[in-house]
Image: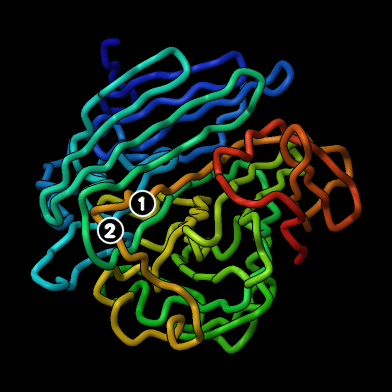
Amino acid sequence: MPLQTVFGQPSTRIATDEAEAWITRSGGHVGPVTFRLGDRNIAPMHVAPWADESWAACGADGEPSPAALTPSMQALRGDFFCMPFGGNAEPWNGEKHPLHGEAANGIWTEKEVHPNAAVLTLETQIRRGRIEKQIHLIPGHQAVYSRHTISGMYGPMTLGHHPMLRLQTPGLVSVAPFKFGQVFPGEFEAPQTRGYSALKPHATFTDLSKVPTFDKEEADLTRYPARRGYEDFVMMYAAPEVQLGWSAVVFPEEGYLWFSLKDPRVLTATALWMSNGGRHYEPWNGRHVNVLGIEEVTSSVATGLADSLGPNTAAQDGCQTILDLNPEAPTVVNFIFGIAPIPLGFDHVAQIESTPTGIRIQSRSGQFTEAAIDLCHLSIPSGPAGRR
């Protein structure tokens, strides 16, 4: 099937009656994504405001600058697979990876394309190996299914998914129970370079509604948009009892919620990237607002592979921050995201558990909704996901 240019990127389309997704050739970003809910089309995923603008491009191994953007920055949209996850400014063992790795920047080759599914491949060069990307939709499901199979590689790696939402109305944010949460342990943004953050660096927390700020107060990260003019990042590591990892954002004014599902043994952490106009340098220019990244990863923080392998607070607390790749046994990373309708009065998600046909989602107020989901895609045990 011929590629079509969508928001500046040659892309492949897959669709069912319930969902449509575009996959960019550059970086393999999945977006835009549209779901059909009753008589409405809902497009919750973010596309960068500079997507149709002309910027000088630097190679997949280059760094973004005011005059040039890496492919991942140019294409920035929807959800994409990162490997290694993070900035990766510091080399490791002779490897110098770009922002979020070759997986988010390289040119993917189409292997198979069907009306509701696509298979693409990437031959990596910095650490030689192969990644196969499978994106598919299931008729009757308002969800996108992703599978990345990593083969031929050896050694430690950080990786993960990078979904981003653009919030048009207030959202209520929840994640599965976690044992350890931490604010970015450094200067996430610096005023001297026209970037600004509100949360206290290095701060740890156990309650997402009580996260320390620079001004010695506490921020409630369960409600967004918030803190206009700031850019912040936090990481949370799943509690041991969690079998089905999940994150969710409820949109009461719009009558639906967005959710993601994962195996917490493979993707051990959830990161929240709250981008609300805190970057005033190019290409951000203060216009990247109301964006929430809900990133499901195995990593320490957003700095990259070298930091995740070195001494870091999360690892010292017993959290898994890397995966070991084995060329003899491919590593498979499965991920699902989608939407579900909600009744009036449905507030923050408290629990997601499996049902014979998918998932049952309970709010803190005790209300329920359900979504048709193929949980076999995750290949994890069924049962309650726990409560927060």
Q: Residue at x 47, y 51 (%)?
A: 289
The crowd level at tag 1 (other Cα within 10 Å; few <14, some 14-19, many 20+) is: some
Q: Place residue 122 in its image quadrant.
A: top left
Q: Which residue is mark 2?
A: 326
Using residue 385 as the reference point, say whether residue 129 is left or right of it: left
Q: Find residue 134 and report its horizontal and vertical position in percent.
A: 39, 32
Q: Residue at x 47, y 27 (%)?
A: 136
Q: Horizontal and vertical percent for residue 246? A: 63, 54
- Up-down: is 167 above or below 153? above
Secondary structure under badge 1? strand
Whether residue 175 is situated above or below residue 36 in the rendered picture: below
Tell me where residue 41 appears, x and y as whole percent: 62, 22
Q: Coloured how?
A: rainbow
Of marks 1 and 2, which one's residue comes earlier in the chain? 2
Query: CA separation, marks 1 and 2?
Result: 7 Å
Q: Determine the image quadrant of residue 343.
A: top right
Secondary structure at badge 2 equals loop
- For disc 2, the neighbor class at 10 Å (few under 14, some 14 to 19, many from 20) is some
> Which quarter shows the N terminus?
top left
Amino acid at circle 2: Asn
Which quadrant: the C terminus? bottom right
Looking at the picture, does residue 126 appear above or below residue 20? Answer: below
* Front residue (pair 303, 176): 176
Side (left or right) of 108 relative to 218 = left
Q: Which residue is mark 1?
A: 331
The reply to whether discs 1 and 2 touch (Cβ–Cβ < 8 Å) is yes
Residue at the spot x=18%, y=55% of the render?
64
Location of residue 278 in the rendering, given as x and y in whole percent from the top left corner: 41, 63
